[in-house]
Amino acid sequence: MKRPNAALSMIIVIAMLTGCWDREYLKDLNLAYSIGFDLTKDHKIKETVELIIPPESEQTATKNEIHSGVGLTTRGASNEIRSRVRGNMRVLKNGVQLISKSLALDGIMAPMDVNFRDPGNPIANVRMVVTEHEAGEIINQKKVGVLKIGDFLTQKIDSLEKMSLFYPPETVDSVYRTLLDPGQDFALPYITKKGEEIIAKGVALFHDQFYSGSLNTDESIVLVLLKGRRGDNARLTKKIDINPSDSPHGEISFNVGKKKIKRKFKVFVTKNGDVHVNLNIKLKAIVEEYTGATPLNDKAISRVNKELSDILTKEAQDVIRKIQKANCDIFGVGRHLIAYHNHVWKQKNWAKDYRDVQFHTKVQVSVISTGVIQ
C-alpha cells in the first residue's frame, strides 16, 4: 500500500511543477553594452543606447545598433527606445554609463534614481563617466577602430584606472552610496571627443549630486595619490633644475605607482571650532627617463628628491584649493567630523563651511631606483 501512495504523491508533485515559464532566448534579446544620458534644451532626458544584436548564424559576427529616446524621465526615455526596437532590451551586459556635463550640472540623483534602485540593473561593475559634450555623440560613433563603442569605453576606463588617473573605480553602486552620505563627495572620470578620438580630460568633481568643477590629468593623478591610492602605475613628468650650470634644464619621468604609499590623514578641531586637516604622503619613485646633463649619482639624487618633493607639495596644495573651490569633500573630512566630532558637525553648515577647512599638506618623494638609465 505504501508504494502506490508514494507513486501517486510523486505524480501529483510533478503535475504541480510549472517549469521555466519566464525564460528568454538570447536570440530574442537586445543587450545594452553602453548607455548615455543627456539633458535636452527643454529639460527632458535623452537616453542613447548601444544595443548588441545577436548573430543570425554561427558564422556571422554580432552587430551594434544605436537608438535614442527622449522622455520626461529616464524610464520614459527607456520606454520610448523599447517601443522602437525588435525584441526585448536588457542591460545585464551594460559596462558604462555616460552622463553629459549639462545633465550633471542639473543634478544626477533624479535621472539616475531608477538605475540605482531597479534590481534588474547591474550596478556593482557599471562605471559612471562624465562627458564634456553630449554623451549620445560619443555612443553614436558606434566604433573606435575595430572595437564597438561599448567595448572601447570599458577598456579605456579600465586602462586609465590602471594609470591612476582615477582610482578606485567609481561604479553606479559606489556613487549611490556616496550620494546618501552627507560627509563625503566623489569624482568621476571626465572624457571628451576631439574629431574621431575619445580622450581623457581628468576627473569631474561633485558636490552632493552636482558637477562643481574638474581637474586635468596630472592633477587627477595627484588627487589619487593624496587619497593614498594608486593603480598599476602612476607616471609623472617634471622639469627639474638640480644643477644651475645645466643648459637646457633636464626633465625627469618617474613612476610612483609601483610601491606602497605611506599616508597620514588626521582631522582635528581647535577650541574655537576651526577644522584642520594634516595630509602627508610619502612616495617611492622609480626614474624611467631623465634628460639632464648631470649624472644621477647619490648627491644628485638627494637634490632630485628635494626638488620633486617641493614640486609635488605645491601641486598637491593647488589640487586641494581646486577641490575646496568646487566644494568637493572627496577626502571625507565631513565623515570624520560625523564620527569623531559629532557635536562640531551638528553646528556646521557643511555646504558652506567645508571651504574654510585648513589643509596642511606635504608630499615627500624618494627615488629608489634609476632603472636602466644609469
Image (spheres, rainbow, N blue to C red):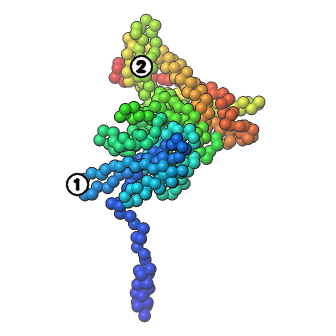
Q: What percent of the width, then of the height, locates residue 277?
A: 64, 30
Characterize the local packing of mark 2: few (<14), some (14-19) or many (20 or more) Cα atoms within 10 angstroms.
some
Residue 271's place in the image compared with 303, above or below, is: below
Q: Quadrant of the C terminus?
A: top left
Give the residue pinned by disc 2: 252
Using the image as rendered, state which of residue 229 and residue 142 is in the foreground: 142
- Residue type, numbered disc 2: Ile
Using the image as rendered, state which of residue 341 and residue 261 is in the foreground: 341
Using the image as rendered, state which of residue 130 and residue 241 is in the foreground: 130
Is residue 167 something that shows in the picture?
no
Q: Quadrant of the N terminus?
A: bottom left
Q: Residue at x 37, y 58 (%)?
A: 86
Local SS, label 2: strand
Residue 239's place in the image compared with 56, above or below, is: above
Give the residue pinned by disc 1: 59
Q: What percent of the width, then of the height, locates residue 41?
A: 52, 41
Q: What percent of the width, then of the height, locates residue 231?
A: 45, 36
Label 2 vs label 1, nearer the camera: 1
Residue furthest out toward the left: 59
- Residue type, numbered disc 1: Gln
